[in-house]
Image (spheres, grey):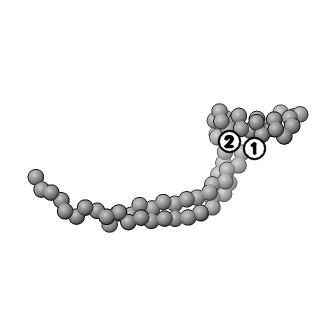
Amino acid sequence: MRVIVTVVEKIISEAHIDIPDGLNQSAIRQHIVDRYNTGEMSTDMNIFQVEFESINAQIVQENSSRKSA
């Protein structure tokens, strides 16, 4: 029997980054988004917490009749 199992987890990552002084809230958001989008922040991300969300299993029917050559 073949079963396809799908596990959904929520992964919370944490990054400690330096942000220039004097930025307003909108500029801080944009700075973080820019760093994330360019991939600069992904190397700083450490998995902080993993929460199990759900698990699903689907049974796949295998073809039992095989043709011989």
Task: From the viewer's perspective, tell me whether residue 63 is left or right of residue 52.
Answer: left
Residue ID for mark 2: 44
Q: Secondary structure at mark 1?
A: loop
Q: Which quadrant does the N terminus fall into?
A: bottom left
Residue depicted at 67% across the width and 53% down the height: 12
Task: From the viewer's perspective, tell me whether residue 29 is left or right of residue 10.
Answer: right
Q: Residue furthest right?
A: 22
**Measured from the top left, where is residue 63 in percent x and y?**
25, 61
The correct choice, above or below, for 17 with respect to 57 in the image is above
Mark 2 crowdedness (10 Å alpha carbons): few <14, some 14-19, many ≥20? some
**Measured from the top left, where is residue 3 in percent x and y?**
38, 63
Residue depicted at 64% across the width and 40% down the height: 42
| Quarter of the image where one finds residue 8 | bottom right
The correct choice, above or below, for 61 with respect to 26 in the image is below
The correct choice, above or below, for 36 with respect to 69 in the image is above
Three-letter residue code for mark 2: Asp
| Quarter of the image where one finds residue 51 | bottom right
**Measured from the top left, where is residue 9 in percent x and y?**
58, 58
Residue depicted at 71% across the width and 49% down the height: 14
Residue ID for mark 1: 16
**Measured from the top left, where is residue 25 in percent x and y?**
84, 40
Q: Nearer the viewer, residue 40 or 66?
A: 66
Callout 2–callout 1 Cβ contact below 8 Å:
yes
Residue depicted at 65% across the width and 36% down the height: 37
Q: Nearer the viewer, residue 47 or 63?
A: 63
